[in-house]
Image (cartoon, helix red, strand yellow):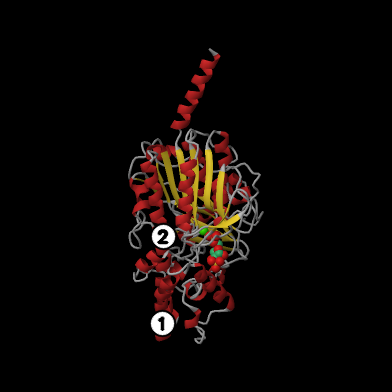
């Protein structure tokens, strides 16, 4: 009798386990929503990523809390703002003894795995399987650190190899348990190196220029003046845009420095032949054009912008192809119906707005991140959601899909009721943001702030400067209303709300300077 009960109980558990959904979370590095056709059709067609929107839900207003890689990844696994999980910038080492989402999944009978970019400096914990890129990782012949702690080189292009490894893991997983699989791509991160077939396809395309491409940052605050994220001045012709230094050495205005030359060689020498020669041949056109036309100022920016977009979008095309491979795998193995698939970028990315590349700012371009979720039978196909969601919500939502209550240490909201249509909109009225990494690449000053439905208030506290934007009238955030008498009341309200948010999320640094 006892044996029978035990058997019944085990098989019931098995049935329950099989009913609980699998979860695949895909994150690409620096993938801006404008480079996904489900959001914006002007730049690229991404049919595979778009499938998630067509068959699931597209989030129109999804944001991060600190627009930089490591911190968003730490937020992803903790459901916490940066000051809580300790990962405030890319240089911090994440304390791997902390309680995290994958550990909660494991405790609830899930298998957990992660393949690809990790960038938290400590090894992953809470994952039954992991294979990660060291640091930023390499695009070609990438190296991976395995669970044994050893590093080995894999043949091929990073996005393809990461997908191969993810699919290999699904092939050999324990099919009696539900799984959570994280696939974290390096692409389309700087230095934007695509595989040959997509370089061939993209290098002749031209893309619409953003209306603020040629904007002068003069007239704006200190933070705009000191940043070093300009395509014209800070994007490198050789290392970022792959112009062979040989074309530039005798042209003082373009001459790359030693570091850039070393970088260029390291990038190119890693590409196996015959692809390397063919890629160099394509990029020769850029060198020849520079020599022939000697563009400068706006004209140079015009070319650099197009070359940046060609390379960045070629990387995205390969990401899309690989998302398709994962979706095909699910189809072929009858996993589609019982698997939630989430697609995000770790943050937004400047694609020429204000003349910039990179991210970091609380401005819409970089604070926003794509979020598409497919969960057949639960999410109505083709739905669009306009609630303000944030990276702190990813963990509560993934756990929520598995029927696991949001742990009390998490600060985000479980979006499952939104996904299933039980809830139409989130009660949340504003978002909190705090960025810390000022003394690093691109010199974006530390700031914090609040994003409401219509207005955004930002405080650059190291220089004691405030910015206020009306997102409805000025979606490109060009006019700082901080001294506008008409907006006095709104400003005071936002300051009060910002202090409340800081209390709610328990952020007290910098202390006492906000009043
Ligand atoms: C590198 C890049 C920067 C980029 C940071 C952080 N420079 O340092 O442009 O902002 O990564 O990116 S590079 O010349 O080394 O490519 S993040 O996405 O990892 O946060
Ligand atoms: Ca990133």
Q: Residue furthest top?
A: 1
Q: Is residue 341 above or below residue 92?
A: above
Count neighbours of disc 1 (C-alpha within 10 A) and say few if under 14, some if 14 to 19, many if 20 or more: some
Task: Give x and y (percent) for residue 466.
Answer: 55, 62
Instruction: Looking at the picture, tell me which residue is in the foreground, 257 or 500.
Output: 257
Count neighbours of disc 2 (C-alpha within 10 A) and say few if under 14, some if 14 to 19, many if 20 or more: many
Q: Which quadrant of the rendered structure holds the C terminus?
A: bottom right
Task: Give x and y (percent) for residue 105.
Answer: 54, 37
Q: Is residue 345 above or below residue 2?
A: below
Task: Give x and y (percent) for residue 365.
Answer: 45, 60
Label of residue 24 in the image: none
Q: Is residue 220 visible?
A: no
The tag earlier along the polypeptide, 1 or 2, is 1
Q: Which residue is identified by label 2?
A: 316
Instruction: Looking at the picture, tell me which residue is in the foreground, 314 or 409.
Output: 314
Q: Residue at x 36, y 36 (%)?
A: 377
Q: Is residue 155 visible?
A: yes
Q: Secondary structure at mark 2?
A: helix
Q: Secondary structure at mark 1?
A: helix
Label of residue 288 in the image: 1
Q: Residue at x 53, y 62 (%)?
A: 138
Task: Give x and y (percent) for residue 473.
Answer: 40, 60
Q: Residue at x 55, y 76 (%)?
A: 261
Q: Give yes or no for contact between labels 1 and 2 (Cβ–Cβ under 8 Å).
A: no
Which of the 4 image quarters holds residue 198? bottom left
């Amino acid at each position: 009798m006892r044996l029978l009960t035990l058997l019944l109980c085990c098989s019931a558990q098995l049935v329950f386990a099989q009913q609980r959904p699998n979860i695949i979370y895909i994150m690409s590095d620096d993938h801006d929503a404008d480079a996904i056709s489900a959001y914006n059709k002007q730049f690229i067609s991404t049919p595979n990523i778009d499938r998630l929107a067509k068959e699931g839900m597209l989030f129109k207003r999804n944001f991060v809390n600190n627009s930089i890689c490591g911190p968003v990844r730490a937020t992803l696994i903790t459901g916490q703002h940066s000051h809580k999980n300790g990962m405030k910038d890319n240089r911090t080492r994440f304390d791997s003894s902390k309680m995290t989402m994958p550990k909660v999944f494991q405790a609830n009978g899930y298998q957990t795995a992660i393949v690809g970019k990790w960038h938290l400096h400590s090894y992953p914990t809470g994952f039954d399987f992991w294979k990660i890129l060291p640091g930023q990782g390499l695009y070609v012949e990438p190296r991976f650190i395995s669970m044994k702690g050893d590093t080995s080189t894999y043949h091929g292009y990073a996005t393809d190899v990461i997908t191969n490894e993810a699919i290999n893991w699904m092939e050999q997983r324990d099919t009696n348990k539900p799984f959570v699989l994280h696939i974290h791509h390096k692409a389309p991160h700087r230095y934007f190196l695509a595989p040959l077939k997509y370089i061939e396809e993209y290098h002749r395309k031209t893309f619409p220029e953003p209306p603020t491409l040629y904007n002068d940052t003069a007239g704006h605050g200190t933070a705009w003046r000191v940043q070093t994220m300009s395509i014209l001045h800070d994007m490198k012709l050789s290392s970022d845009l792959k112009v062979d230094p040989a074309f530039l050495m005798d042209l003082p205005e373009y001459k790359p420095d030693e570091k850039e030359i070393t970088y260029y060689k390291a990038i190119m020498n890693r590409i196996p032949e015959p692809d390397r020669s063919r890629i160099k041949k394509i990029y020769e056109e850029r060198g020849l054009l520079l020599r022939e036309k000697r563009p400068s100022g706006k004209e140079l920016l015009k070319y650099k912008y197009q070359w940046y977009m060609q390379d960045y979008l070629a990387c995205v095309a390969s990401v899309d192809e690989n998302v398709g491979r994962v979706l095909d795998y699910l189809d072929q193995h009858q996993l589609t119906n019982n698997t939630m698939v989430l697609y995000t970028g770790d943050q937004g990315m400047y694609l020429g707005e204000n003349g910039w590349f990179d991210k970091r700012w609380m401005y819409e371009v970089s604070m926003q991140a794509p979020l598409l979720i497919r969960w057949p039978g639960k999410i109505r196909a083709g739905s669009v959601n306009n609630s303000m969601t944030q990276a702190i919500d990813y963990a509560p939502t993934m756990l929520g899909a598995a029927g696991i209550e949001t742990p009390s240490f998490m600060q985000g909201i479980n979006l499952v009721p939104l996904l299933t249509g039980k809830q139409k909109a989130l009660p949340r009225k504003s978002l909190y943001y705090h960025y810390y990494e000022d003394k690093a690449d691109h010199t974006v000053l530390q700031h914090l702030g609040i994003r409401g439905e219509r207005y955004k208030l930002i405080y650059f506290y190291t220089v004691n400067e405030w910015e206020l934007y009306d997102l409805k009238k000025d979606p490109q955030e060009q006019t700082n209303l901080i001294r506008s008498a008409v907006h006095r009341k709104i400003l005071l309200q936002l300051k009060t709300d910002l202090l409340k948010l800081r209390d709610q999320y328990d952020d007290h640094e910098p202390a006492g300077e906000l009043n």
